[in-house]
Image (cartoon, rainbow, N blue to C red):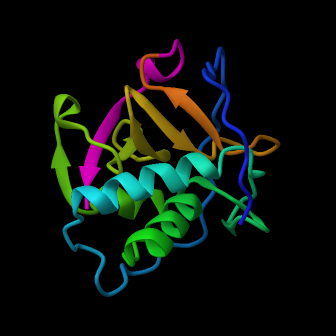
Amino acid sequence: MHTFALPALMLAAGLLVAGCGTPAPSAPRAGAYSRLSPEQSSDIAIHALGLVGTPYRYGGNTPEGGFDCSGLIGYVYSSRAGVAPPRTVAQLSGFGAAVEEGELRTGDLVVFGRGRPTHAGIYVGQGRFVHAPSTGGTVRLDHLQSRYWAQQSASYRRP
């Protein structure tokens, strides 16, 4: 596992996201809809923050090989909470229970896209989320109210 120092503030200006790469859809695995304790949710957020700086890789799902957005979510949830979320962004959009933006807590999922989900990340508190944005990039910390992300349609899920 790689651990990277996290700058105090990382803002994305003009980030262009072509969508998160994911392999062909697969069925959700057993145990995908369990309730997480507040401690597990916090541990998920802390672990996700520790992966900031890991390279993006289409279809990637390990720190050594890199991550795409759904691979990052699967890795963090599996390793920190023993929960195996679905592998595709489309399937993540129905994972767990819907929550309102005002009810977000650490460890919740942020899913972007109008109609067809295109990207997802892990909410880490204070309006920020960790995600693997695009080819050539790295896992990063962004703010939901940044210039780019505030314009995107987002929904929120709690496993």
Q: Position of residue 37 (x, y in %)?
A: 22, 63
* Residue 158 magenta: yes
Q: Position of residue 29 (x, y in %)?
A: 37, 84
Q: Nearer the viewer, residue 99 or 26?
A: 99
Drawn side of residue 159 relative to residue 81, left or right: left
* Image quarter hosting the N terminus: bottom right
Range drawn in magenta:
146-159
- The residue at the far bottom in this view is 30
Rendered position, 31 above or below 3: below
Rendered position, 7 above or below 137: above
- The residue at the far right in this view is 136
* Image quarter hosting the C terminus: bottom left
Residue 94 quadrant: bottom left
Drawn side of residue 92 relative to residue 133, left or right: left
Please give the name of the residue rendered at 54% of the width and 18% of the height, measured from the top-left corner. 148
Please give the name of the residue rendered at 47% of the width and 47% of the height, measured from the top-left corner. 120
Please give the name of the residue rendered at 78% of the width and 68% of the height, measured from the top-left corner. 64
